[in-house]
Image (spheres, rainbow, N blue to C red):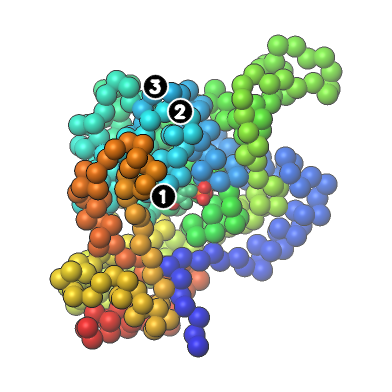
Amino acid sequence: MKKILPYSRQWIRPKDIRIVVKALKDDFITTGWHIDYFEKALAEYVGVKYAVVVSSASAGLHIANLALGLKKGDEGITSPNTFLATVNSLTCTGAKPRFADIEHDTHNLDAAAVAKKITKRTKVLIPVHYAGHPCEMKAMRAVAKKQKAYIIEDAAHAIGSSYLGKRIGACEYSDMCVFSFHAVKNMTAGEGGAITTNNEEWYHTLKELRSHGLTRDPERMDKHEGRWWYEQHRLGFNYRITDYQAMLLWSQLKDLDSFIARKREIVELYNHAFTDVPELVTPVEKDYAKSAYHLYAAAVDFNALGINREEFMKRLAGRGVGSQVLYIPVHTQPFYRDLLKYKPDDFPNAQKHYRTNIALPLFAKMTNGDVRRVIHAVKTVIRGR
Ligand SMILES: *Cc1c(COP(=O)(O)O)cnc(C)c1O
């Protein structure tokens, strides 16, 4: 029996492994020079002044919110169409998460919907570049500005994406940007994340928050009693990653553009093949956007099709094709439903997206044979119902 193609999968090549092995033989396997080395490469790649690598995007979002001073009494607005971590990062600080609806076509947080929800209590907006498609950041910035709210981009899907010709992470229309290097994302170290910013003060704060609130920077200490000296001026965490993970990321970053080019090729093949399948709506790419396509997020009206999604996914799996649903709207999760008292229909576009979404396999390592298998399976299941 053939292995099932997953909706996403890492690609670790022999050259990645060689670099990791080399890093493991170094004297420092954590808090060593490889961390700075990768941070510089990442900052250069996205076109930003500073990058801070952390143990995950969840950790990154948490300390990004803290660096902006979020606390109890504050609110943050984000998308219901995201992974739990985006929303939890607000809740962790004591701030209250709020939601606004998404655009019906990109499935990204809708700036016009945010404009209706934003108040003076809103300290931060967290737009999520869903599936790798950048949010309308100019519009988002204009809305944020009116209430003096900050913007943190959740770019867990979007390393390698561009908005108006500039890479996501450049922070042209935001204050900070957070990437994920989890195994299903565009590039990976198994786990890992990074925050980028052009603000020097936040950069230093993020580095302290990553490591227990500790600093050894003479300019940020009250005194300096000797070479052993360090000081704590705030509460921090251990959100570090290891040096060998940093080198795996460095190695993956070098080939990120070729991973994305291959993914975009596969997207073209899918889009073309599905032009004669009106039951399946293919993803859009706006003029302002170049997507890194973390996901191939298609939409199917399963009611009209007459097969429920569970059955649809089961039939695909029977043909060796995995699929996934992203995301269950966070405001409908029992924890947030009870905490925030939202109703499922409060965000109709997010709800409709959830009902119709189906992510098909998309990762750089896929062969053309894999792609044909997916196309054939989707067409057979839709037509053979
Ligand atoms: C994966 C993901 C995260 C969390 O990333 P981790 O690195 O696993 O903590 C946050 N937001 C979104 C949108 C994600 O997809």
Q: Quadrant where the C terminus lies?
A: bottom left
Front residue of 59/204: it is: 59
Other residues around mark 2 within 10 Å, as few (<14) / some (14–19) / many (≥20): some
Specify the quadrant of the image occupied by residue 299: bottom left
Disc 3 target residue: 73
- Answer yes or no: is residue 140 visible: yes
Residue at screen point 70% across, 59% down: 19
Kindly report the distance in space between the C-alpha atoms of the residues bearing marks 2 and 1: 19 Å
Residue at screen point 20% across, 37% down: 112
Residue at screen point 75% across, 53% down: 23
- Answer yes or no: is residue 287 visible: no
Q: What amino acid is labelled 2 in the image?
A: Gly
Q: What amino acid is labelled 3 in the image?
A: Gly
Other residues around mark 3 within 10 Å, as few (<14) / some (14–19) / many (≥20): few
Q: CB of mark 3 within 8 Å of CB of mark 2?
A: yes
Among numbered discs 2 and 1, the one appearing first in the sequence: 1
Question: Of all residues shown, which one is farthest toward the left?
Answer: 304
Question: Depth-wise, is mark 3 or mark 1 nearer the camera?
Answer: 3
Residue at screen point 51% across, 26% down: 67
Answer left or right for 136 relative to 57.
Answer: left
Specify the quadrant of the image occupied by residue 189: bottom right
Answer left or right for 11 relative to 377.
Answer: right
Q: What amino acid is labelled 1 in the image?
A: Phe
Disc 2 target residue: 94
Question: Residue 160, image x and y in percent?
Answer: 45, 52
For label 3, the SS is loop
On whether ligand 1 comes within 8 Å of the CB at mark 3, the answer is: no
Question: Residue 205, image x and y in percent?
Answer: 58, 26
Q: Tell me the tag on residue 83.
A: 1
Among numbered discs 3 and 1, the one appearing first in the sequence: 3
Question: Residue 24, image x and y in percent?
Answer: 77, 54
On whether ligand 1 comes within 8 Å of the CB at mark 1, the answer is: yes
